[in-house]
Amino acid sequence: MNGKNSVISSRVEALYRDYGKRAKELKDEGKTLIGYVCSFVPVEMISAAGCIPFRIRGDINEPVTKGDTVLETIVCPFIRSCFDLALKGKYDFLSGIVIPHGCDSMTRSYSTWSYSLDLPYAYFLNIPSVVKPASFEFFAEEIKTYKKTLEAFIGHEITEADISQAIKLHNAYRNKIRTIYDFRKSDPPMVSGVEISKILTVGTSLPVEEANALLDEIIEELKTRSEPPLKTGKRILVDGACVDHAGLVKLIEESGASVVAETTCNGMRDTFPLTDEQEDPFTGLARRYLDKINCPKTYRENRAGSFEGNIADRFGDIGRYAEHFHADGAILYVYKYCDPFGFEVPARKAYYNAIDLPLLWIEDLYSSGTMGQIKTRIQAFLEMIEQ
Amino acid sequence: MAEQKKKHKKRRTATRAAASIGPMVKEFIAGTVRAQREGAQKLAYSFIVCHHEEILRAMDVLPIWTENFAGVCGAKRDAERFLQRAESLGFSRSLCTYALCGLGFDHWREELGEMPPDAPWGGQARPDFMISTGQILCDPRAKWYQAAQQYMPDVPIYNIDLPYPLYHPDRDHREELPYYHKYIVEELKGLIAFVEEQTGKKMDYERLWERVRLSDKTWNLIEATYDLRSAIPCPMGTGDAMNTMVPINFMMATQDAYDFFLNLKQELEEKIKKKEGVVENEKYRLLWGGGLPSWFALGDFNYFNSKGAVFPAETTYRMVAPIAEMNIPKTDDPVEHLAWRWLGYWTFWYDKARQRKGGEPDVERLINYIERYKIDGVVMHEAFSCRTWHVGLIWQLHQLAKIYKPIPVLRLGKDGNKTQAWRENPSLVLESDIIDITSYSEVDTRNKIDAFIDTLESVAKSRVD
């Protein structure tokens, strides 16, 4: 079903366009919503607390104005946009925020966020920078502190059973996203990159149970879809930080290609790894968020002893996804002032070269104003890989 | 660039101690190159403010402070060629320019197999290993050496994780300290094991204790020395402190650092006795309230001085706090002590911040310095390439403005009487970079300083009125 009764083109589209619409309704119903940025926040704990995790997104069409009066312009443009919207009241339905140690732009602006928004609950979650036995142990303790602060906020205990149940629900969500990704394997894919971008964005703005029900409907719809939404074209993997809007993917697909995978912070980097349900929940969460989320912020020891071996270890998941989804090329999309990704650009370029996957590297601002220039570069890149 | 370098004058210092720093830095950079040639000591790329100097010194490892070398390139106005090389490799100019300078230099040196031509002060030696650090302080410190491994794949890295709990006004951070401490101890022990493997030597823990005690003693001495700057007229400003930061940050755990501050303290005491200030007619006392300096434009401090303004205090690079006030638990283990000191330093202002409604540690420190050093205005610097030290500064100034209002306020004295006081404390934010000179305009900067001085003058007049 591709028509106006489609879940994707009606419900997903509406929730995407009016981001936070459902959250406002839930707030009016007396629910408690906790906002967060970055993939590093264990949303399971928020759900286990009986609250609703809500991923704060930016808006590429909204110029940063109010935010610039208190936050420096050298902050990552994505975080600036999120903060600006929050300050302008776009997320007034939130009762709290969780900001993790995802990067300097998040960490150093935590005070600015927490004091400027002055929400009843604010928590900075410390994430280790390395992956070692001691760092898992530390992180599990930090998650326990995070749990305690949530308990103090909601006024009751969060039991291990609550957490285990939330882990199951969020794992189910991630499995359903994987199922939707399977519809991309065909050529042309049976679900477009733009549709996936919107689904990913919308999914993290809903209570996990509602998101799961919505994904079930989407899966059913895709099963019955008879016509692919795109023509056959070059298959592109998008790599980089958080791309929580469909603008970039739309440019790529309007240029005749299909986006078939996103190793981005709100894409497969976040949605593919699962929490081990057999482990003690704190250990399971610590492992998922610290080790399985492959973020450049986390330092991984060079066990290979060579540069080639090291990049194969660090970026091997990208290569596997590229192969799985039959990518013909990749676009590395990095924001200006992003130190974690920025310092990896030469190494990532070397990796793409090693796996023989053509790459276009774009450094951008989080703004619709740059999309024209980017489109020209994308078109040139697609022409190059056509040859 | 050569023309620019030729024209660049050396900055005037107020103290003999600050003037002695240049040759000292030159010598320890040259010393690392010499040590590499002689092969007697292992060399380690290192970052400042990791509380691991004691470990390195106790194991006879010679640190190569890569941020320092980048700063030297900046101060000599010779960073641009290394920055351009890093850009050509695919690193964006928006990233930390210390790191870009280092990466550009390393790539060039590795390509040539020798130092790049006319390398500042003989260049930066190739390390035997690198100690990076992913603390909640600086992303580039976790990424820089990893990126450098692309050009030096045979040089191993130990990444030491050094977190500390962030401030939450409604929570006592002490509840979290045990697991933070345990983790940091593990990390420091991991570093010791790594260095033992790299050097083939075992750690002598008695020797480590000696180094730790020496550092603690130096920390207290630095506090006592810098407190002398509260004198009127001020005997030493931030311009000089950007030199004296060298023993604090690059020479800690050495007798030389301790002796340096003994001499500086004596010099400042003499100046105070003679009422000898940085400027002859001290009009304004300013706080350097945040941001790393533009190393290529330290002469701007002299420009402030020429207007009768002096900086008795700065938050930048004053990476020590009074040990006695940290309540460090007693321990027989020097590694445990280092971990407690790390946490003590980063949480030092937390309790004080909690005592003020809406308080925050960074702001509390500013308030403390404003009062302690009798400050008339605050100057900050926004370096475009560094998020670590330059995010949150505008917000801090907003918070300060709530306390130091441009209106008279009533103060309740100990005798119960109310007196009217003017507490306005204007601020100035300079914009440029740490070493990227292309971001700097001397004319614009000095126009801003002139306008700020006018504001200070106007505020001073209001106070008199």
Image: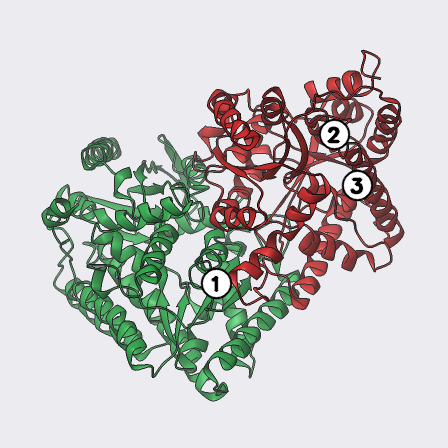
Chain colours: A red, B green
For the residues labelled 1 and 2, the Cα–Cα distance comes to: 45 Å
Q: Residue furthest top?
A: A4
Instruction: Name the residue that disc number 2 marks.
Output: A187
Which residue is at the front of the view, A114 or A138? A138
Which residue is at the front of the view, B32 or B59? B32
* Mark sitting on residue B132: 1
- Type of the residue with mark 2: Asp
Compared with residue B171, is residue A175 higher up or lower down, i.e. above or below? above
- Give whichever of discs 3 and 2 has the lower sequence position: 3
For the residues labelled 3 and 1, the Cα–Cα distance comes to: 34 Å
Describe the element under mark 2 as helix, strand or loop: loop
* Mark sitting on residue B261: none
Crowding around mark 3 (Cα neighbors within 10 Å: few <14, some 14 to 19, many 20+) is many
Q: Position of residue B97 (x, y in %)?
A: 36, 48
- Type of the residue with mark 3: Arg
Residue, x 42% and y 50% (percent of image)?
B414
Describe the element under mark 3 as helix, strand or loop: helix
Quadrant for residue B441, please give it: top left
Crowding around mark 2 (Cα neighbors within 10 Å: few <14, some 14 to 19, many 20+) is some
Q: Is residue A257 left or right of residue A370?
A: right
